Image (cartoon, rainbow, N blue to C red):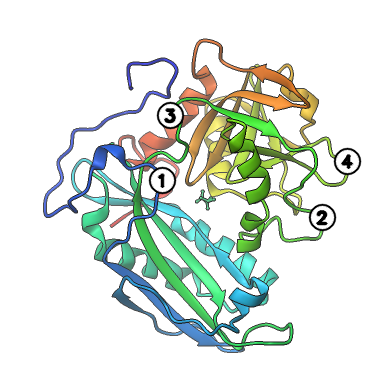
Amino acid sequence: NSNNVNTLQVSSPASNVVGEQADIDWDNLGFGFRPTDYMYMMKCSQGESFAKGELQRFGNIELSPSSGVLNYGQGLFEGLKAYRKHDGKILLFRPEENALRLRMGAERMCMPCPTVEQFVEAVKATVVANERWIPPPGKGSLYIRPLLMGSGAVLGLAPAPEYTFLIYVSPVGNYFKEGLAPINLIVETDMHRAAPGGTGAVKTIGNYAGVLKAQSAAKAKGFSDVLYLDSTYKKYLEEVSSCNVFVVKGNVISTPGIKGTILPGITRKSIIDVARSQGFEVEERMVAVDELLDADEVFCTGTAVVVSPVGSITYLDKRVSYGSDGVGRVSQQLYSTLTSLQMGLTEDKMGWITQL
Ligand code: COI
């Protein structure tokens, strides 16, 4: 409900899409998987480089039961979005950043990786092939999910002999069931997402399987998601299962610094730049859980969640609420600036948009 101050206010451009659109309910997308027409596939052997990929009809893939990804979790994923602009053009947000992050992750997980150029070209080709699945302006986006995995067979623990790079897409709306309304988080005190020296800073698939237990328990209690603490001191904020976290106090916006256990979010990085350009002071540092007590606002960032305002955080049975009269001013401002840029409603002074 865009008239409700309890939800983020969205800019809604006039719809002007030409050509055939998929026949789905664009008004109720949510963040569920919908199969589309094509996927991109590229394979290479260990010790070699990815050379040539191709678009294929979307469908199940064949994997050895002994593949590295199934047995030892040798896999990475990425997430980025394509938006339909009101003039019909397609916009991608910083795809080279995803390519670079995948390369960092591949190095950590002992996998060969497509070059930045190969990655971006493959993303473009996949989006164009699935163009009819891009939601009309203001209705959502096409979520792009690149995967890199050890697809070759292994038995003893070792890097797989063959790798597959795959991209599929799905039209999406809001990530949380709350839509654009503030979410309610609970701080997890027993389980941790990542440890120093581990793989918390790369987008490896196991990081996400490992949070399902805490997330399910939180959801069963009515919370939207879990906020993790560091595993050493158990008192500094890390991130939410699927997104980074920011704390606002006056003109200062703080977020956990990138130190090996935090996923270097592309939305995180973009929001830091946007906030600084708007005169906020942004601190990347260790943020103690106690700071949640006297924060003015808290919000999360991620490709899937975009900018999600936090309405309350529960820690050791104590609940702190934010924005008693709806979405906080800073969260709203940053959300509007970022999404207007992503949807092509404002001039791209940052040079972040790739237009197809
Ligand atoms: C994204 O925000 O794109 C992610 O990869 C998080 C995922 C859990 C949906």
The reply to whether discs 2 and 1 touch (Cβ–Cβ < 8 Å) is no
- Residue drawn at x 51%, y 32% is 308
Q: Earlier in the sequence, mark 4 or mark 3?
A: 3
Report x, y in % for residue 291.
76, 24
Report x, y in % for residue 50.
49, 82
Which residue position is annotated with label 1? Answer: 31
Amino acid at circle 4: Tyr
Dot 2, how many residues are within 10 Å of its Cα: few (below 14), some (14-19), or many (20+)? some
Amino acid at circle 3: Leu
Mark nearer the viewer, 2 or 1: 1
Q: Secondary structure at mark 3?
A: loop
Q: Left or right of 31: which side holds 344? A: left
Report x, y in % for residue 61.
42, 77
Which residue position is annotated with label 2? Answer: 196
Q: Earlier in the sequence, mark 4 or mark 1?
A: 1
Compared to residue 264, the image places residue 322 above or below, namely above
Task: Residue 291: give its label.
Answer: none
Which residue position is annotated with label 4? Answer: 233
Tell me how far mark 2 sits from mark 3, CA to CA: 34 Å
Within the image, what quadrant is residue 111 found in?
bottom right
Amino acid at circle 1: Phe
Nearer-the-camera pick, 216 or 54: 216
Dot 1, how many residues are within 10 Å of its Cα: few (below 14), some (14-19), or many (20+)? some
Within the image, what quadrant is residue 297 found in?
top right
